[in-house]
Amino acid sequence: MIELTGITRIFRMGGQTIYALNQIDLEIQDGGYVAIMGPSGSGKSTLLNVIGLLDRPDSGSYQLDGRTVTDLSEPEQAQYRREKIGFVFQSFHLVPRLTAAENIELPLVLSGLAPSERKLRVNEALRAFDLSDRATHRPSELSGGQRQRVAIARATIMQPTAILADEPTGNLDHRIGAEVIALLENLHKTGTTLIVVTHDRELGDRAHRQLILRDGKIIADKKA
Amino acid sequence: MTLADTFHLSLKTVLSYRLRSVLIILAMTLGVAAVVVLTALGDGARNYVVNQFSSIGTNLLVVMPGRAETSGAFPGAVLGQTPRDLTLKDAQLLGRLSQVRRYAPLNVGEAELSAANRLREVTVLGSNADLIPIRHMKLAQGSFLKRGADYSAQIVLGSQLAREFFPRTQAIGQRVRLNERRFLVSGILAPQGKTMGHNTDEIVIIPVKQAQSLFNTTSLFRILVEAKSHDAIEPAKEAILETLKQSHDGEEDITVITQDAILATFDRILHALTLAVAGIAAISLIVAGILVMNVMLVAVNQRTSEIGLLKAIGAPAADIRFLFFAEAMWLSTAGAVFGFLLGQLGSLLLRLAYPDLPAWAPVWASVAGILVALITGILASILPANKAARLDPVQALGKQ
Ligand SMILES: Nc1ncnc2c1ncn2[C@@H]1O[C@H](COP(=O)(O)OP(=O)(O)OP(=O)(O)O)[C@@H](O)[C@H]1O
Ligand SMILES: [Mg+2]
């Protein structure tokens, strides 16, 4: 359960104050499927980053699963990101030196899991995302769709409660994008909260709830 | 993140930026190797000199005429006097001192040695029977100067001269001439080669009185004295100065130097030299450390978006810091190990090229070289690692 109250995020640029988020109040139930939409610069990514504990709001309070997380220490926030949240980015963000399997393994390495256990879970994920024959390939040797599948496998390997995807299909063509969305929706079906930032109206319509942002404010909250 | 995983992941990074890693490791390697080889050279030179100097005798004191003043004027010169000569009588007086085990008077000059139609200029030493034990010389054949027979016409040849003058015949018992004086060859010195700059294989030794009359002098060049023990060196020095002051009418006109003091001085100077050389080599290590820092800072810039990703998937700042730190550790440890090995190889080559030079790097130098490499590596990684750990994840992710 995600609860934001009065969340404000300000950027100061050369004497000018930009309200990337302006007094946001928001509640997202566990297992929800939410699309965040709105024009460029409206604060979609900032909202996602605040929810994912990557960014700290300047004011307001954020409760995740009943705990106030806005004033957690840096290592505690890192632990929340590691265990409860999976990020998927538009530009994949794979480590170029590591193979597909090693990229998927990274969160497990960070959590200090034993190598034998890691291997089992990575192999399982490779099978689930149809990447078994690409396990030892580096990102440069993978197609865009394969890269995003690796990124989604990495985001889910820790079995997070929420997947936060920032324009996950933005760098993919329509057909591959639809496949990636299908994968994310499958995850949602298993009970994971899914929050997707998108410009794509069609994609937004698939979500069970649509938030429309403008100038750092939620101007519409449509439930299907 | 476990320690093992941190080192494993950073090793992968080191291996994948191959050229960069090789260059840094090379710089570290050369720095450490320089410390090892240069100290091996310095310490080798020190040991060489000390050994050479020790080999010329034990508990040795050298008495020479004239007062060596380190400060102030030559007192004799001020008074218009010349220093009194050392005489054989002086030498005999020293032989009676309780701290003295034995003594050998010494006269040195050049003379023409002739025998069996051969003729050459040689260095002539005039001395007594105790020269052999005092100077640690060895006889190859025959007998040395007869004890108490300062006037006998016997001669001992250096090994090279014996071979030159009597290539096919037995040298012992042959007659030779030194400037028209006849001598009978009684012994041949064992080959010794050069010690302290002069070649004992090309000298001849005759009784001291023979030498004095050959060179038409009553004085001595030096008196070599061996103290009874190491502890007796300083008392012997005092006693010698006192005795000769009395015999020279109260004038302190001689100088006594001890082998011990000279050895200590050489040892000190050459040790200081080794330290200085090691210090200069260590500077190259610090330069290598600055290189590590620079390269790691560039790496943080290059990998900004990767650092952002690591933070997004839940790496705390401490993990990021330690990843960069471990990377620098790999680089500097590899540099230290390869540098140590290269340095040992270099010292081995030095020893092969100059067998006389005991070019072994002292343990302290190897340890110091390795430690300086590791410490500079660690220090150099602090700044870049902190920079990486403090990056804002959102901005880092945004950077390509
Ligand atoms: N680091 C920053 N410094 C200054 N201003 C920033 C920073 N990050 C975001 N902003 C500003 O905050 C506002 C919201 O940015 P945000 O990235 O959340 O928009 P967005 O809705 O994701 O846009 P897009 O659809 O283009 O990705 C924008 O006006 C942006 O310029
Ligand atoms: Mg955005």
Image (tube, coloured by chain):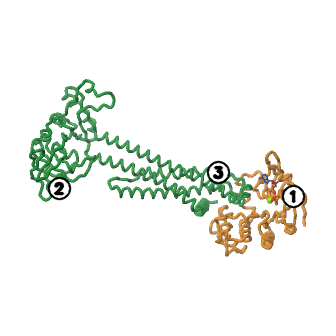
Chain colours: A orange, B green
Q: For the C terminus of chain B, which image quadrant?
A: bottom right
**Residue type at the position of mark 3:** Asn
- 2 or 3: mark nearer the eye: 2
Q: Which numbered circle lies on residue B163?
A: 2
Q: Give the residue displayed 62% in from the left and 67% down from the top.
A: A115
Q: Which numbered circle lies on residue A213?
A: 1
**Tag 2's secondary structure?**
helix
Q: Position of residue B376 (x, y in %)?
A: 54, 50
**One can see residue A183 in this view:** no
Label whose residue precedes the other's in the sequence (2 or 3): 2
Q: CA distance from mark 1 to mark 3?
A: 36 Å
Q: Give the residue displayed 62% in from the left and 49% down from the top.
A: B383
**Tag 3's secondary structure?**
helix
Labels 2 and 1 in the same subunit: no
**Residue type at the position of mark 2:** Arg
Left or right: residue A147 versus residue B181 is: right
**Residue type at the position of mark 1:** Leu
Q: Which residue bears the numbered disc 3?
A: B386
Q: Quadrant of ligand 1?
A: bottom right
